């Protein structure tokens, strides 16, 4: 991440999370089982990140989250009994963590690590898990390499890194995506508006392909697994918010796992990247 892009990220997320109300997070962690039962069966990021019984495996484990953002996942992991360390470049994330620790009796209060993570003073081989939800794609590739090296340094020998990231394995589908307006992102057909949006976008231009994340991971880890997500679930956008949409997404996230792996990977819109066994 260049200094310009780093500052752009900091300003963007400080503004995004400034004044964030923790009321919703407290409601979710006070109704933890029902929240996770819903989120992990209807939402791609929660479905992927909590795959393979992650919610039970982390109890009593030391977990580091890179790019904790609004701190929802950090709070959920801490409420599940994990000893959570959370980092973000945005100072506002630290204020959210402070408010959460004051409002909820976690087994282990969440520890916030502020600023540039590469300058942390954490000891090596100290964490059972390192996680990031939609974090790596904010990094320019040379900086991503440094973060993965730091991830390998911090993990225990039998530890595991999990990153949920967008997947772009089809240039054709990606080009279609840019021409469909979503949220505050205009269509590429609107050249002026799209350029203005792109100039303010904190995400760098880089690869999000599964092949990239495999190649990058194999430089510092012996084991790499990629789980594609969202091939069918993406069509949930055709439904209005409500029970029908949730039922479709529940069906889609299960059904797409039966699609042949190569096809599923090429059409998925997201992915869980799992790294194990750091190369010493």
Image (tube, rainbow, N blue to C red):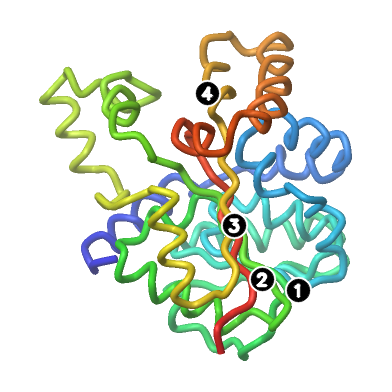
Few, some or many residues within 10 Å of mark 4 (<14, 14–19, 20+): some
Residue 85: mark: 2
Q: Residues within 10 Å of mark 1 (few under 14, many from 20)?
A: many
Crowd tier of the residue under label 2, counting other residues whose Cα lies within 10 Å: few below 14, some 14–19, many 20 or above: many
Label 4: which residue?
Answer: 234
Helix, strand, or loop for circle 4?
helix
Picture coordinates of residue 244 (x, y %)? 70, 9
Q: Which badge, 1 or 4, is on the more N-terminal residue?
A: 1
Residue 238 or residue 17, whichever sits in front: 238
Viewer-nearest of discs 1 and 2: 1
Front label number (3 vs 1) = 3
Label located before the other in sequence (4 or 2): 2
Q: What x and y, as percent, mark residue 138? A: 38, 55
- Label 1, label 2: how many angstroms apart (C-alpha)? 8 Å
User: Within 10 Å of the Cα at label 3, are there few (<14), some (14-19), or many (20+) other Cα atoms?
Assistant: some
Mark number displayed over residue 18: none
Q: Which residue is mark 1?
A: 62
Q: Answer yes or no: do the residues labelled 4 and 2 have beta carbons within 8 Å?
A: no
The residue positioned 59% from the left and 24% from the top of the image is: 233
Give the label, 2 or 3, closer to the camera.
3
Vertically, is 141 above or below 122? Answer: above
Q: CA distance from mark 4 to mark 2?
A: 32 Å
> CB atoms at circles 2 and 3 under 8 Å apart?
no
Task: Answer with mark 3 or mark 1, whichever residue precedes in sequence.
Answer: 1
Q: Is residue 69 left or right of residue 213?
A: right
Q: Please, is residue 157 above or below residue 171 in the view? A: below
- Name the image quarter holding residue 98: bottom right
Give the residue number, with chain letter if any, for mark 3: 225
Q: Residue at x 76, y 51 (%)?
A: 76
User: As rendered, which of 20 and 112 lies closer to the eye?
Assistant: 112
């Amino acid at each position: 991440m260049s200094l310009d892009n780093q500052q752009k990220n900091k300003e963007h997320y400080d503004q995004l999370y400034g004044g964030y109300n923790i009321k919703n997070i407290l409601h979710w962690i006070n109704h933890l089982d029902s929240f996770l039962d819903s989120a992990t069966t209807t939402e791609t990021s929660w479905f992927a990140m909590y795959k393979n019984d992650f919610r039970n495996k982390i109890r009593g484990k030391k977990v580091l989250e890179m790019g904790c953002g609004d701190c929802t996942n950090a709070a959920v992991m801490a409420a599940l009994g994990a000893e959570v360390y959370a980092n973000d470049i945005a100072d506002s994330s630290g204020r959210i963590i402070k408010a959460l620790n004051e409002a909820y009796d976690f087994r282990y209060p969440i520890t916030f690590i502020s600023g540039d993570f590469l300058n942390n003073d954490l000891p090596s081989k100290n964490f059972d898990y390192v996680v990031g939800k939609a974090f790596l794609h904010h990094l320019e590739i040379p900086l991503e390499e440094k973060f993965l090296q730091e991830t390998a340094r911090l993990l225990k020998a039998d530890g595991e890194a999990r990153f949920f990231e967008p997947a772009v394995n089809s240039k054709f589908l990606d080009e279609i995506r840019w021409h469909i307006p979503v949220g505050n992102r205009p269509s590429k057909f609107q050249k002026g508006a799209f350029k203005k949006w792109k100039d303010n976008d904190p995400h760098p231009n880089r690869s999000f392909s599964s092949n990239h994340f495999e190649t990058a991971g194999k430089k510092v880890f012996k084991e790499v697994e990629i789980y594609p997500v969202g091939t069918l679930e993406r069509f949930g956008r055709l439904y209005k918010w409500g029970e029908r949409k949730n039922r479709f997404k529940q069906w889609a996230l299960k059904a797409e796992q039966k699609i042949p792996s190569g096809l599923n990977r090429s059409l998925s819109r997201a992915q869980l990247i799992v790294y194990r066994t750091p190369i010493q």
